[in-house]
Amino acid sequence: MPIVRIGTRLVYFAHIPKCAGSSVENYLKSRFGTLALLDRRYLSVDSEARWSRTSPQHVDWASLMRMFPPDFFTDVFAVVRHPLDRAVSAYRFQAEIEGTVSAGMSFGDWLQAEFEARRRDPHRSDNHSRPQVDFIPPDQSQNCAIFHLEHGLDALIPYFDLLAGEVAGPRTMDHSNKAGQTASADGRTLGAIVPTAQERALVATLYAADFERFGYAPDYKAPLAPPPILNPEFLTDNAIARAKTVRPIHRLAARARDRLRVWRG
C-alpha cells in the first residue's frame, strides 16, 4: 500500500505484484520523496517475525479498507498487465528468486497448484498470483485511475504532473526488475517460457475477472483500451529524455542506481 504525498494530495498506489510496481515507486520517490507503507526487505525477514501476511505494498483492497476509511485518500491509481504475462512473470519469480517451485514443475502445474492453495491461503506467495481485481476498488464508488503496462510507464508521468499541478521531475520512467536483470541465489534460470494452449486456457479461466475488468483478450497481447492521449509538449520532452538514456554513460549510471537500490532494499 505505498502512500505518497503530492502537494496537498494523499495518493494511494495500488501496487499489483508483477506489474512494474517497483519502477513506479522508484519514480515517485525520486520526484516526491519517501513513500509510506513500503517495505522492500519484507521477504528477507524470517516468516515468524513478519508483522503481516504480505508485504505492505502488496496488500489487497479488502484488507486495506479494514485499516483506512474509503475517503482517506484523495487519489488512487494502479498499473495492470495482461494476465498471462503477469502469471508467467510470477512463476519465473517464484522459481528463480524465491525458490518455491519444484525443479521441473511446469508453469501450468504451478498455476493450478497456486489456485488450489489460495483457497486455504489467499495471501500465499506475497499475493503474486492473486487476481489483479483484488487490489483495486471493486466498483466505481472509489475512483481509481487504471494504466496498462503495455502502453508504457511513461504514460503515468502526465498523470503525476496533473496531481502535482506542475510539470517537473524526470520525463521518463525506468523499468526496474525486468526479467533477466536479477540473478537467483543458486543461479537457476528457466529460459524462455512459452505457455501451451492448455495453459493459456487455464489462465483465461482463473483470471477471467481480470480479462473482463481491464479489457484484455486471452490471445491478444495489447489491451483493448486505447493508450492515453499525451500532449505534444510531453512527447517532445519524453523523446529527448529517452534519447539520453541510450547513451553509454547514462546506461552505466542507470545500472549503478539499480544496484544501489537492490543493496539498500
Image (cartoon, rainbow, N blue to C red):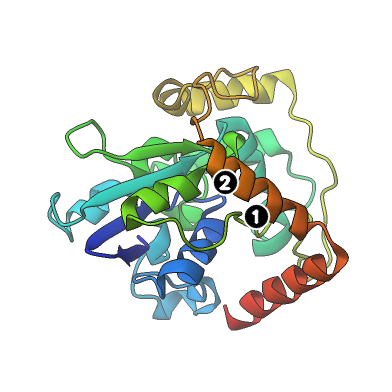
Instruction: State the quadrant of the N terminus.
Output: bottom left
**Residue type at tag 2:** Leu
Residue assigned mark 2:
153
Closer to the N terminus: mark 1 or mark 2? 2
Q: Position of residue 93 (x, y in %)?
A: 66, 54
Instruction: Give the spatial CA distance, label 1 vs label 2.
Output: 8 Å
| Contact between labelled residues 2 and 1, with CB atoms less than 8 Å apart | yes
Q: Quadrant of residue 87?
A: top right
Callout count:
2
Task: Report which residue position mark 1 lands on.
Answer: 175
Is residue 111 placed above or below 98 in the rendered structure? above
Q: Who's the residue at 52% across and 71% down the image?
A: 43
Q: Is residue 213 left or right of residue 61?
A: right
Residue 95 visible, this angle? yes
- Measured as percent of width and height from the top left, residue 247 is found at 84, 61
Of 178 and 93, the residue lying toward us: 178
SS state under label 2? helix
Q: Position of residue 257 (x, y in %)?
A: 68, 74
Q: Is residue 178 visible to us here?
A: no
Q: For this rendering, which residue is in front, 89 or 48?
A: 89
